Amino acid sequence: MLFKTKFIPLAIALAFAGSAGAQEVIKIGHVGPVSGPSAHLGKDNENGAKMAVEDLNAKGFKIDGKPVKFVLQLEDDGSDPKQGTAVAQKLVDAKVNGVIGHLNSGTSIPASKIYYDAGIPQISPATTQTKYTQQGFNSVFRVVANDAKLGGSLGSYAVGKLGAKKIAVIDDRTAYGQGVADEFIKGAKKAMPGVQIVSKEFTNDKATDFNAILTTIKGKNPDLIFFGGMDSVGGPLLRQMKALGIKAKYMGGDGICTEPFAKLAGDAAVNGLVTCAEAGGVTGEQQKGMDDFVARYKKKYNADVQIYSPYVYDAIMTMATAMQEAKSSQPAKYLPFLHKIKYQGVTGLISFDPKGDIKDGALTLFTYTDGKKTKVEVIK
């Protein structure tokens, strides 16, 4: 009996000592489409997430003075809303400490309620649909400008800088495509009330044949066509525009603003014909940080940055910084610190308004020159 009474406290003490010395593991969920038409963008996002976690672990990141280890749980939503909600529930069940994603507005918005109900903060590196941060959820954030900013600015630029007076608009019926197209129209009309929207057509995000809608548009003789959607559709659409002899300028949002777009469009992406915008942008001294990231990415993956990997990187770093400031990785404890965060990332200063939108979100305009995406200017 004497042996037992001494042994049990000793075992308990050893157990406590072991747990006290164990390194805390912080699980970050990342969701993006690594299958389907936007798989190249989803993989780019995953690469950005891996870089961030490797950097955090390499520098011995500490929370409340104690070293922690970050691990990623990578999930594929295939750009499909049903798949997106399924993987969101999977991450909740896995008790992740936070979520970075999704890429598409159509998957991010329905998934956001699942994370909100579980009390898990979500930072999207790419969701631009305005609805995302207008649902009354205090757990949603984004590190890019929304469609009202992106689409509206493009609409203003189309009539003010490009001189468009007759515009045709096409969208792919996704939450993102419709949202950015609608905001583009609002922006164009606000900048020039007399602008004519001569045609408003739609396709889908898996379409390959656009002859019917383009023939309709050709008869309206627009001087600019705006497409709301992704590069996998936007590139072939431009190629078919040229085949039909449509000479209008071509414009789109961040969904088409990729390096592969020029290949998808073929020789239709002639110099200066296309104008697109990315949500985000750096100038001056901040440019060096972005250039360094791009060079590191190229060396590590032997590939060019597509669009969002720097924003994924910054989203993870922002979340980690909030945990550090809160001295806790528990969602309920670090969530309030995300609302007041000020983090200087490679994409610029990250801080959020009360809804979770990034403050003072910039846009970068691009065109294509000799088949390469070329920066035009940063606008705010």
Image (tube, helix red, strand yellow):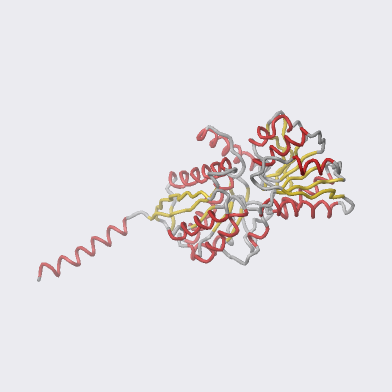
| Of the pair 149 and 227, the residue shown nearer to us | 227
Q: Is residue 222 above or below residue 321?
A: above
- Residue 89 on image: x %, y %: 48, 59
In the rendered image, which quarter is residue 329 located in?
Answer: bottom left
- Residue 359 on image: x %, y %: 66, 56
Is 204 left, or right, of 68 in this rendering? right
- Residue 125 on image: x %, y %: 59, 50
In the rendered image, which quarter is residue 38 located in?
Answer: top right
In the rendered image, which quarter is residue 81 located in?
Answer: bottom right
Give the quadrant of the N terminus.
bottom left
| Of the pair 326 and 24, the residue shown nearer to us | 24
The residue positioned 54% from the left and 62% from the top of the image is 337
How many numbered marks are there?
0
- Residue 170 on image: x %, y %: 75, 47
Is 2 left, or right, of 83 in this rendering? left
| Of the pair 254 and 68, the residue shown nearer to us | 254
